[in-house]
Image: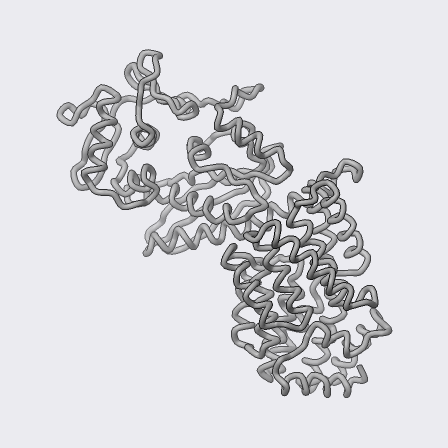
């Protein structure tokens, strides 16, 4: 964006201040301050906004702020006495009062992409390694109230920080993405300049003590909006509001990008699959939780490793498929599958110890090997790395349930469901919620959750066994028998040992109840 006033031009795309067409020397912080004031020339900018925009929220003294204001005035031929361009509102903030005209660097009618700056060109180059890239634009604040002026930047910055925890996603730095502040900017052109496959944009408005945030995720290749939402929440605590909004936005964005990448990969001819595309196509099959799709997923993860032998997530995916083979006894050799699950999990951790998915697969390996206590720290670490990782939070719920911690399991699972309500493993989350009541002998509530689970897509044989347990203990013998019949129909050779291979309750009382109940049902 180019802002013109008097004989000056502030070019935020080239990070340059010019006077009569000639570049001026200016410090980066002073430029950022001018950018903030000039781009918001229609309103007063508070000192809190300046603090957030220039110093990233770090507390600095008033003297430091005033020194930057003085330098900004000097750079554009103004001073504290004249205040012809930057006016001080004592105790409130500053306002840019000179007449400003703007010129977009990327007009919508533009058919060719402008030459990239070094920074933007670098972003575009990074984005070509197969991984998706995303840029988060500053949210537009639709209110003249100076108290909320910095909130849009603050929320977007929190989103950038949280997205940066996802090692599989390239996140464009704030310094590049925050240059695009125009409400009608063309997303496709911005994506080309920044080298971003996806863009997050939105607005914040206020009505009384309630804020309304409208946010959308766009695919820059075709301008398609992949997701949009309106989030309302109170504004009594602006700090908490930042975290609440960013948490919700990041959780949805993560799942939507994964779905978009899987859909994109599905359209690529098999012979042209690169490591990243093969991995995402494998994920789609892996989450269907049946033997046929699981074997396809394993082949695709192998394909990804052939293309990139150091692809940590492909190893984690293979670990997941071997876990699934052992958990549902697809191959008849549980021990071999457990060994391979551990091998690939350890390899994935070796390659990327800070990836939440690799840590999760290590935790699940400990679970399938029967060492539940050793699995929990890996899941804790996964959640520490990505606090809104619903799948890791759900798995903590599973292990807490097996350890007999029913309330903790319910809390974990409820949070996972709220974070990912349309998760492909939703049936498993619902089942764990059922078992969290089963281990507390609350069988009627266990039935309610189990019935929801068996109606969910992709519910596998163990889900029907759990429903049978809940119904039998709740006194619904006929319903329990029907659930057992579904088990027999889907797996004629199913045995109790198959169930307890994955669900080894630590509490002896719960284990005894489960075994006696399955015996009564001739399972």
Residue 182: image location, x then y, percent: 43, 31
Residue 514: image location, x then y, percent: 69, 83
Residue 269 vs residue 487, the one in the foreground = 269
Figure quadrant of residue 113: top right
Residue 472: image location, x then y, percent: 71, 84
Task: From this view, report whether residue 297 is shown above or below residue 177.
Answer: below
Residue 455 vs residue 66, the one in the foreground = 66
* Residue drawn at 48 percent across, 49 percent down: 162
Name the quarter where the N terminus is drawn.
top left
Figure quadrant of residue 49: top left
* Residue drawn at 31 percent across, 45 percent down: 58
- In the image, taking residue 463 as reference, residue 173 lies left or right, namely left
The mark total stands at 0
**Colour treatment of the image:** one colour
Residue 362 vs residue 1, the one in the foreground = 362
* Residue drawn at 15 percent across, 23 percent down: 82
Task: From this view, report whether residue 145 is shown above or below residue 375.
Answer: above
- In the image, taking residue 337 as reference, residue 84 lies left or right, namely left
Name the quarter where the C terminus is drawn.
bottom right
Q: Is residue 182 visible?
A: no
Residue 435: image location, x then y, percent: 63, 76
* Residue drawn at 86 percent across, 74 percent down: 493
Q: Is residue 486 visible?
A: yes
Report the residue that reaches farthest toward the right.
492
- In the image, taking residue 498 as reference, residue 19 lies left or right, namely left
């Amino acid at each position: 964006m180019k802002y013109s006033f008097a004989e000056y031009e502030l070019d935020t795309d080239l990070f340059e201040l010019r006077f009569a067409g000639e570049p001026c020397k200016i410090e980066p912080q002073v430029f950022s301050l001018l950018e903030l004031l000039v781009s918001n020339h229609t309103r007063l900018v508070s000192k809190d906004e300046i603090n957030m925009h220039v110093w990233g929220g770090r507390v600095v003294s008033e003297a430091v702020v005033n020194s930057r204001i003085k330098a900004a005035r000097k750079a554009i031929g103004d001073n504290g006495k004249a205040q012809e361009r930057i006016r001080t509102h004592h105790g409130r903030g500053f306002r840019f009062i000179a007449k400003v005209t703007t010129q977009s660097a990327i007009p919508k009618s533009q058919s060719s992409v402008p030459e990239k700056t070094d920074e933007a060109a670098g972003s575009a180059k990074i984005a070509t390694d197969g991984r998706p890239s995303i840029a988060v634009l500053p949210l537009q604040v639709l209110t003249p109230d100076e108290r909320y002026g910095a909130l849009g930047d603050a929320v977007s910055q929190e989103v950038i920080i949280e997205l940066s925890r996802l090692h599989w996603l390239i996140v464009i730095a704030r310094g590049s993405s925050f240059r695009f502040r125009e409400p009608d900017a063309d997303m496709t052109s911005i994506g080309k300049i920044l080298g971003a496959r996806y863009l997050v944009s939105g607005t914040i408005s206020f009505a009384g003590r309630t804020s309304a945030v409208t946010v959308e995720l766009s695919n820059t290749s075709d301008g398609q909006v992949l997701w949009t939402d309106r989030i309302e929440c109170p504004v009594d605590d602006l700090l908490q509001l930042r975290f609440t909004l960013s948490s919700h936005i990041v959780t949805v964005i993560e799942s939507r990008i994964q779905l978009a990448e899987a859909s994109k990969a599905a359209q690529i001819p098999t012979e042209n699959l690169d490591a990243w595309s093969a991995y995402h196509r494998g994920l789609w099959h892996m989450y269907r939780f049946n033997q046929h799709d699981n074997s396809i997923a394993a082949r695709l993860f192998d394909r990804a490793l052939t293309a990139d032998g150091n692809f940590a997530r492909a190893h984690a995916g293979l670990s997941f498929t071997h876990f699934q083979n052992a958990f549902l006894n697809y191959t008849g050799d549980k021990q071999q599958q457990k060994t391979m699950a551990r091998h690939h999990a350890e390899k994935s951790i070796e390659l990327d110890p800070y990836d939440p998915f690799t840590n999760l697969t290590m935790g699940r390996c400990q679970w399938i090997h029967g060492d539940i206590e050793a699995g929990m720290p890996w899941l804790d670490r996964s959640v520490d790395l990505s606090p809104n990782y619903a799948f890791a939070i759900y798995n903590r719920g599973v292990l807490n349930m097996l350890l007999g911690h029913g309330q903790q399991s319910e809390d974990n699972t409820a949070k996972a469901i709220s974070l990912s309500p349309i998760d492909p493993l939703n049936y498993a989350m619902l089942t764990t919620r059922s078992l969290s009541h089963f281990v507390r002998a609350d069988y009627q509530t266990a039935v309610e959750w189990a019935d929801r689970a068996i109606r969910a897509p992709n519910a596998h044989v163990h889900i029907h066994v759990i429903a049978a347990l809940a119904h039998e203990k709740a006194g619904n013998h006929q319903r329990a028998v029907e659930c057992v019949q579904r088990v027999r129909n889907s797996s004629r050779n199913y045995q109790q040992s198959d169930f307890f291979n994955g669900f080894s309750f630590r509490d002896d009382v719960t284990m005894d109840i489960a075994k006696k109940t399955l015996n009564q049902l001739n399972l």
